[in-house]
Amino acid sequence: MDNLDRSNFGSQDLNEPIPLDKDFDKPIPFDDAGTSETGVSHSPLDLGGGTAKVPKIEVPKPVAKKPAGKIASTDRIAGVKTFFTKLHPGALNFLDEQITTWLKNNPGVTIKRTNIVTGQVQAKKTEPNIVITVWY
């Protein structure tokens, strides 16, 4: 604090303690505590219109949407079929054909749920694969 600007403190000595004769717990009074010399009124303005009626706007209530029907059947799951292949375009096309062929050969199958996961499958080499599980 070697470069303290003393010009802001007037003649007050900064090394002197704060005088104890001042009561710092006492609230600070307002400058215009009922004795305002400016003549400014702080009461609300009366524009002569009386009480204003605000028109009530009717907001339409939102219509609840009908829940969409479930795609999956509520019957018990009877079986599961798993398809998997490597992650490259030719293999994915082959996987599509496998699933389509299986569904055509089993017309009585009602699909209840499907899961799709990607991960490493270990064979001769460990490679990323897609695994599709069909619950029916």
Image: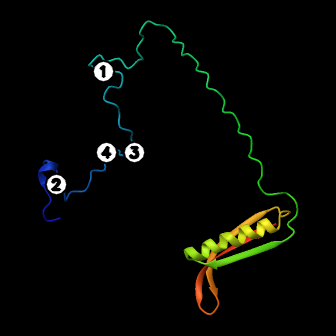
Q: Residue at x 86, y 63 (%)?
A: 108
Disc nearer the start of the sequence (2/3) = 2
Disc nearer the start of the sequence (1/4) = 4
Q: CA distance from mark 2 to mark 4?
A: 17 Å
The residue pinned by badge 2 equals 13
Circle 1 sits in a helix, a strand or a loop, which is it? loop
Disc nearer the start of the sequence (2/1) = 2
Q: Residues within 10 Å of mark 3 (few under 14, many from 20)?
A: few
**On screen, residue 133 above or below 21:** below
x, y percent for residue 96: 66, 69
* Type of amino acid under label 4: Lys
Circle 3 sits in a helix, a strand or a loop, which is it? loop
Q: Nearer the viewer, mark 3 or mark 4?
A: 3
The residue pinned by badge 1 equals 36
* Type of amino acid under label 2: Asp
x, y percent for residue 29: 35, 33
Q: Nearer the viewer, mark 2 or mark 1?
A: 1
Circle 2 sits in a helix, a strand or a loop, which is it? loop
x, y percent for residue 102: 77, 70
Q: CA distance from mark 3 to mark 4?
A: 9 Å
Q: Nearer the viewer, residue 28 or 48?
A: 48
**On screen, residue 37 above or below 133:** above
Residue farthest top in this picture: 48
The residue pinned by badge 3 equals 25
Q: Residues within 10 Å of mark 4 (few under 14, many from 20)?
A: few
**Image quadrant where one finds the C terminus:** bottom right
* Type of amino acid under label 1: Ser
Q: CA distance from mark 3 to mark 1?
A: 25 Å
Q: Looking at the rendered structure, which numbered label has been put on residue 22?
A: 4
Are dots 3 and 1 in contact, CB under 8 Å?
A: no
Q: CA distance from mark 1 to mark 4?
A: 26 Å
